[in-house]
């Protein structure tokens, strides 16, 4: 595998299960044991009921484009060959929003409410990034 030069997620104790699931090509979110709220990104306590008890649950990976932008400005040298590239906020069917990229669709064809599903990009042997493609 060639060296990956773009920023990688800083995996923490809290986010570790999310990234382990991504390596298995599964999308998992925190589910509050107090009220059932699903959340992303992970938090130590539930923002709805303040419970500190949660479990990780598999979600569908399906959602829709909630918003997106196209980056034309180079902010980080490793992204030079990607310009212009999209950054999208996908709202999952289960509710939470994930900031990611839309792959396999030309930037000019991305639209709000476009149905998408998660795909997993194994960028290193240790990290798989969650991206989305048109469903
Ligand atoms: Zn809760």
Image (spheres, helix red, strand yellow):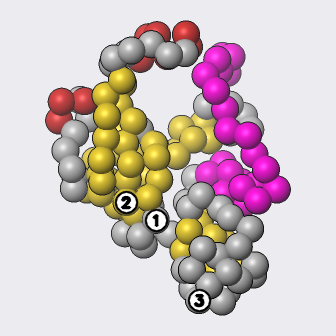
Q: Nearer the viewer, residue 51 or 124?
A: 51
Using the rendered view, name the quadrant where residue 124 is placed. Answer: top right
Residue at image location 58% in from the left, 52% down from the top = 25
Look at the picture and state if 110 lies above or below 106. below
Say if disc 3 is inside 8 Å of ligand 1.
yes
Question: Left or right: 95 with respect to 20?
Answer: left
Q: Is residue 6 magenta?
A: yes
What is the CA distance from the residue labelled 1 to the residue labelled 3? 15 Å
Look at the picture and state if 39 lies above or below 10. below
Question: Left or right: 121 with respect to 7?
Answer: left
What is the CA distance from the residue labelled 1 to the residue labelled 2? 6 Å
- Mark 1 crowdedness (10 Å alpha carbons): few <14, some 14-19, many ≥20: some
Q: Which mark is residue 9?
A: none
Circle nearer the N terminus (1, 2): 2
Which segment is the magenta one?
1-24
Q: Please give the residue where the numbered disc 2 appears in the rendered image.
A: 91
Residue 89 visible to an observer of this rendering: yes
- Mark 3 crowdedness (10 Å alpha carbons): few <14, some 14-19, many ≥20: some
Q: Secondary structure at mark 2?
A: strand
Q: Which mark is residue 96?
A: 1
Instruction: State if disc 3 and disc 2 touch (CB < 8 Å).
Output: no
Q: Please give the residue where the numbered disc 3 appears in the rendered image.
A: 35
The percent coordinates of residue 52 (x first, y second) are 75, 78
Circle nearer the N terminus (2, 3): 3
């Amino acid at each position: 595998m060639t060296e990956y030069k773009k920023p990688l997620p800083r995996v923490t104790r809290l986010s570790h299960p999310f990234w382990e699931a991504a390596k298995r090509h599964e999308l998992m979110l925190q589910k509050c044991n107090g009220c059932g709220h699903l959340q992303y990104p992970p938090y130590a306590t539930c923002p709805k009921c303040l419970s500190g008890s949660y479990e990780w649950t598999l979600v569908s990976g399906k959602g829709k484009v909630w918003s997106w932008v196209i980056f034309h400005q180079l902010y980080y040298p490793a992204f030079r060959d990607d310009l212009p590239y999209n950054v999208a906020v996908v709202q999952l069917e289960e509710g939470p929003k994930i900031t990611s990229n839309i792959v396999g669709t030309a930037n000019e064809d991305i639209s709000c409410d476009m149905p998408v599903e998660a795909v997993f990009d194994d960028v290193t042997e240790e990290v798989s990034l969650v991206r989305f493609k048109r469903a």
